[in-house]
Every structure is written in structure tokens, then in C-alpha cells.
Amino acid sequence: MFGFSFRPRKNGSAQTAKERLQILLAHERAGGTSPDFLPTLQREILEVVRRHMEIDGDAVDVKLERGNELSSLEINIELPGPEKLADKKKN
Amino acid sequence: MFGFSFRPRKNGSAQTAKERLQILLAHERAGGTSPDFLPTLQREILEVVRRHMEIDGDAVDVKLERGNELSSLEINIELPGPEKLADKKKN
């Protein structure tokens, strides 16, 4: 039922320089009467992450599932790889 | 390896009035050279959540695991149940 799991990193050269951040949220509501605030949390958490790193808009993949008792939010973010950061340090 | 999953709700009367919010973060670092910012994210995300709901300090359970290539953070928060909110509305 509560099926969250990390998606395995794809094999291949396109993935070697990539890092990723995955954020999973689940709100379990007893009776389903409390407000559903996951969409708001999604926006605010992305703002928090952007304070620490530059994120390309295309690099964010969001899945929101809303149910009566359980709502879940999955955010997958591809980050610039360390090679890019290392290049910056050299200059 | 990437073993995140929701802990099942415990059976019993103590759980019936409780809601919960679970937040899982995973930072997969290619090569492990980029900064580890999960502890900072943890603090900031909890601030974001507190904007929307009152959280008792005792109700927050945090597990941080730091590895060379994968760091993960699990935050479990017990929230006041809807019965409490419903009582407030009656008065």
C-alpha cells in the first residue's frame, strides 16, 4: 500500500555526471478531515532546496497522489554533477 | 540498498486519533565530492511544515544516515488528530 521506493539509477553514460535528490512526503490522515497541504509544501520545499543549489526547471519531476486517508508527494531532482563543480574550482 | 518504506501504522487505540507526516530525503552523490546539506535541509523543511501546523518537539523523530555516495534522512512527525480539530470547531 505505502509503496515508496527509490527508483534505481539508470545505467548509461548520461547518468555518470548526475547527482540527484529525492524527496518523498506522505500525509496520513485519520478520517481524512484535515486539510491537504501537500501541494503547498511541495512549492515551499522546492524553494528551500533552491537556496542551496541551482535547479533547472526541467530537472524537477513531481508526482502527487491524493487519497482520502493518504496523500503522497514524490519530488525527483537532477542536480549538476560534481565534475561541473570541480571544473569551477580549477579556474 | 535504497530501502525506504513507510512504517506501517501500529494497531491500537493510541493510534486512532493520530495523523502523521513522513518526509524522506535522499541525496545521491556521484563520487561523493559535493557538500552534504541534508542536516540543513532537515531544519529548514521542519520550519516550512511548522508554518502549517503546530508540531510538538517530542512528536518529531529524525533518522539521518550519511554515506559516501548516498545520504538519507527520514523525518516522522505525529500530528494532532482530526478529532481534536473537530472539538475546536464545536466550541
Image (cartoon, coloured by chain):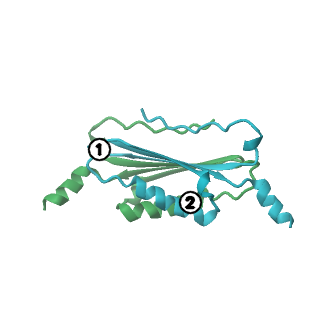
Chain colours: A green, B cyan
Mark identifier at residue B80: none
Which image quadrant: the C terminus of chain A?
A: bottom left
Where is residue B82? Give x, y as percent: 76, 55
Number of numbered discs: 2
Q: Is residue A17 above or below residue A55?
A: above
Check disc 1 and give the amino acid type: Ala
Q: Which residue is mark 1?
A: B30
Which is nearer the eye, A2 or A18? A2
Q: Residue at x 67, y 38 (%)?
A: B9
Chain letter, disc 1 residue: B
Number of residues whose C-alpha sits closer than 10 Å to that of mark 2, classed few (under 14), some (14–19) or many (20 or more): some
Q: Is residue A19 above or below residue A47?
A: above
Number of residues whose C-alpha sits closer than 10 Å to that of mark 1, classed few (under 14), some (14–19) or many (20 or more): many
Q: Residue at x 41, y 58 (%)?
A: B40
Q: Which residue is mark 2?
A: A41
Where is residue A29? Give x, y as percent: 70, 49
Chain letter, disc 2 residue: A
Which residue extends farthest right? B90
Which is nearer the eye, B53 or A34? B53
Which residue extends farthest front? B58
Q: Secondary structure at mark 2?
A: helix
Which image quadrant: the N terminus of chain A?
A: top right
Q: Is residue A89 visible?
A: yes
Check disc 2 and give the amino acid type: Leu
User: Is residue B83 toward the left or the right of residue B24 in the image?
Assistant: right
Q: Are marks 1 and 2 in contact (CB under 8 Å)?
A: no
Q: Is residue A65 visible?
A: no
Discs 1 and 2 lie in a common subunit:
no
